[in-house]
Amino acid sequence: ALTIKEITKLVEAAKDPSNPISLRDYLLLELLYSTGARVSEVVGINLGDIFENQIGNETVNVLKLRGKGGKERIVPLGTYAKKALDEYLVRTRPSLLKRVNENALLLNLRGGRLSRVSAWEIVKQSAERSGLKLRVTPHVFRHSYATHLLDGGADIRVVQELLGHASVTTTQIY
């Protein structure tokens, strides 16, 4: 797992004020870390998978993720990821959109759904720009997310649910 400082450096490296596409890349990295999602789950997010839940007097932003075996789970969307999402939806997605009925959240330059391979490449490029000498993959974000939650005192069963693990023994590796 990366440290919080390394994750922050890596995510921030995706931002390039001169390139609006970098908002998509920044959102991808924010989603990978703030949800602990697998890369296939993140590139599979549709616009209809983003919604708000009312919990008491508080409104919480959440995402629906489709995991292994077609299992769906709902995960909270943190404030940094929500801010990145809002910026991307306003400033970048409209310029990438080629087909009005395209449902995918993250779009490639041709207006279609961003692929897993492209997501891997974005992670790799951001790692290089950040100066990290470690081999960084999308799964490193998931591993770091789980580790940071557990280090922060989260219950292992909660982390299990957030990661979509069928068994708590899978979560115990973190």
Image (cartoon, helix red, strand yellow):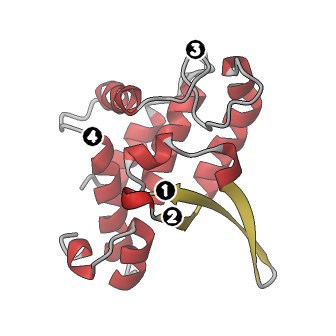
Residue drawn at the location 67% of the way across and 34% of the way down: 88
Label 4 and label 1: CA atoms lie apart by 20 Å
Residue drawn at the location 34% of the way across and 24% of the way down: 125
The residue indicated by pointer 1 is: 66
The residue indicated by pointer 2 is: 72
For residue 3, side relative to residue 28 (left or right): left
The residue indicated by pointer 4 is: 137
Label 1 and label 2: CA atoms lie apart by 4 Å
Contact, CB < 8 Å: mark 4 with mark 3? no
Q: x and y percent of residue 85 in the render?
A: 65, 43
In terms of sequence position, does the residue under pointer 4 or pointer 3 come before the other?
A: 3
In the rendered image, the vertical position of residue 41 relative to residue 104, given as above or below: below
Label 3 and label 2: CA atoms lie apart by 28 Å
| Crowd tier of the residue under label 3, counting other residues whose Cα lies within 10 Å: few below 14, some 14–19, many 20 or above | few
Could you say which disc has been placed on residue 167 in the image? none
The residue indicated by pointer 3 is: 110
Give the amino acid at mark 3: Arg
- Helix, strand or loop under label 2: strand
Pick the residue in front: 114 or 87: 114
- Helix, strand or loop under label 4: loop
- Image quadrant of residue 106? top right
Between label 4 and label 2, give the one nearer the viewer.
Answer: 2
Q: x and y percent of residue 67 in the render?
A: 42, 57
